[in-house]
Image (spheres, rainbow, N blue to C red):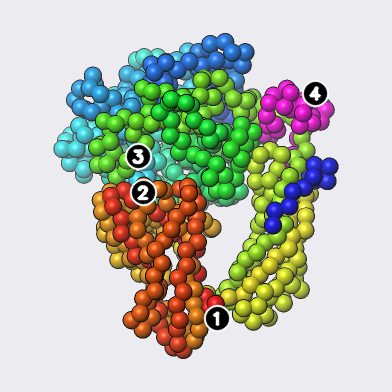
Amino acid sequence: MKTKLLTCLATLLLATTSLTACGGATMSDEEWEEQYGVIVPEVKGLSKDYIMGMDVSSIIEVEEAGGVFYDWDGKEVDLFEFLADNGINYIRVRLWNDPYVDYTDPTSASFQGGGNDLETDIKIAKRAVDAGMKVCLDLHYSDFWADPDKQTAPRAWQNLVYYGNTEGSIIYAAAQWTTEVLQAFTDAGCEPSMVQVGNEINNGVCGYTVATWKDIFLHDCCEAVRNFDKNIKIVLHLAEGANHEGLSSRFKEFDDAGIDYDVMGLSYYSYWHGSIESFTDCINQLDKEFKHDICVMEYSYGWTDDYKEGSNQANIYSSDDEKNGGYKTSVQGQASYIHDVNEAVAGTKHGIGSFYWEPAWLPLNGTSWASDDAHAFLLAQNGAGGEGTTTWANQALFDFDGHPLNSLKAYSLMKKGGKYTEQMLEADTEVVQNINSAAADVEAELPTITTVFTSLDRWTEYTIKWDKSGVNELIKAETGSTVEIHGVASKGKSSFDVTGIFTLYKEYLLNPGFEESPTASDTTIVPGWEVEATSGAYRVESKNARSGQYNFNVWCEGAYTVNLYQVVNNLDAGTYELDAYFRSESGADPAIQLYATVNGVTQTTNVVYGAGWSDWVLNSVVFVANTGDSAEVGIKVTGEAEDWAHADDFTLATIA
């Protein structure tokens, strides 16, 4: 149950609000609103050279499509000069080899997405340098988008051999190209201060798989940067910035392979990758394990669900993502997210800064995530979607017409801030949950956190301490019983009472929520489950889970089938319910049957999905078993090309 807390009763301080006031006085909500439009407390520990960066790779394409930007007074302004005046000191830009329909002809149709070839990027870098900012160059080593799902070598290199570092190999070509690019930037007077060798290289780079990339491709390309100028910081960039296990494993592999790099770069989108608390915990652990610098190379959040009338806008973020994202879809929520990400990074020993991704990508015809002509290329790379549309405009720091949002003020306010008492507005004071009586440690099954919505338009996690006598009563209770336990939720000096309503059930499944995670290098391992599937059609994914960190994902570039199941032996006599949660998107939803087979008889339910791609919907199937029976339970998936779905939180329990 969520309880709304009246402001006059909610003056409890949260852990992050012991801050110095502007001019020495405490500011009220109204004073913050009048002076700045948003509330952004000071972030302590920001060094003079802390990176307040932005990736504006699409800017040339936006301006050529008619995009115009304005200052706080509504006067037309140069974007780079305006950003520099508002605390931004670094510009990141992505570089593709030949982002054209005909890779041999730069005058052929652009793939769009910023059209980031060498000529375009030098224009961007020169404007950044002229405005007094430094440049971070993001080398994708591809003709178009590179990320964990797609790492395709440029078409000009695809007839070269993969192995070896001599002329005629992709490695040799990539290292030579790296040097040539750096020379071109230097000759233009805009040598980068930081270079990414690859973009989101969790699963490979430039067509190389995990097994072959680290001690050959990365070694030679990093060496090319180091030999060109030893003062350039070298970044190795991974996605899923709250996934400590996967990140730590990868960076250790880089270190063990002797790769010479300076910065552990992360992408962190809370609505995909996990809560700000999990991100903070992740980078704190990385900070202790490694001596490399830490920098968030990409992050952003939505400020609206609206669309610009008559535009090509197709928002990839919506308010459906608030539950995972942890912030309200608002300018204040966006500002709070910017504050919290940078507070987490600045709070580590090796944290050096962050880059907000595409704050100036306006929804204009003539600029898009991918042109219609790029569709075939994306399909070949294991991913499509977004063609012909602008998908990031509602996560920008400017409105759809180029006027700055008050969330942009976060970058200057983080340096000076103001004293502010963050107020609890709404809290989860009642927790209702089923508890597995068959667990080895029943107490460990109890929830440990609850959420509070605050006046900073964010949800923050409070730790629950349950009454010991109630816990002991739960441990002794029989399966099927419901026990009420009282507890206290707290964070810093703030606390409130919480009530837990727990019903005991016996869980028969192994790894029902997929939290027994796979290795970082093989996401097709699903402990406790059997899988029969078309090659490449499934994986355990470490983002956007319904609960915990992991969930089961199906997708394939062609038609596919997946059968995920396990056999449960020695059932007790009774009626059973198999539950599971699913989500997908209309038009991309595969046919899934949730099923249970006992004594040759199969009961099935055709899975239904929610209204939005992030809506988890409970589906159930009921069956009867006799003493000693075995049951095969799971899902059968039939999908057309590019159909996708996620499953999480299976439960098998008696209901009678």
Image spot of residue 519 (x, y percent): 40, 59
Instruction: Mark 2 vs mark 3: give the one in front.
Output: 2
Question: Is tag 1's residue or tag 2's residue first in the polypeptide sequence?
Answer: 2
Residue 153 or 618: which is nearer the viewer? Answer: 618
Return the residue at label 4.
23
Quick one: 517 or 513, which is closer to the camera? 513
> Which amino acid lies under the numbered mark 4 shown in the image of this protein?
Gly
Identity, as a three-letter code, of the amino acid under mark 1: Ala
Disc 1 target residue: 656
Q: Disc 2 marks which residue?
A: 588
Marker count (numbered)? 4
Q: Which type of secondary structure does the marked residue at label 3 adopt?
A: loop
Instruction: Tell me the SS state at disc 2.
Output: loop
How far is mark 1 from mark 2, CA to CA?
A: 37 Å
Task: Please provide the residue range marked out in magenta.
Answer: 15-44
Camera-nearest label, 1 or 4: 1
> What is the CA distance from the residue labelled 2 to the residue labelled 4?
55 Å
Left or right: residue 5 compared with residue 556 = right
Q: Earlier in the sequence, mark 1 or mark 4?
A: 4
Instruction: Indicate which disc, 1 or 3, sits on the residue closer to the N terminus.
Output: 3
Amino acid type of the residue that numbered disc 2 sits on in the rendered structure: Ala
- Real-space CA distance between mark 2 and mark 3, rounded to the nearest whole angstrom: 11 Å
Residue 161 occupies quadrant: top left
CA gap between label 1 and label 3 equals 46 Å
Q: Picture coordinates of residue 564 (x, y %)?
A: 36, 66
Pointer 4 with pointer 3, Cβ within 8 A: no
**Alpha carbon distance from label 4 to label 3:** 50 Å
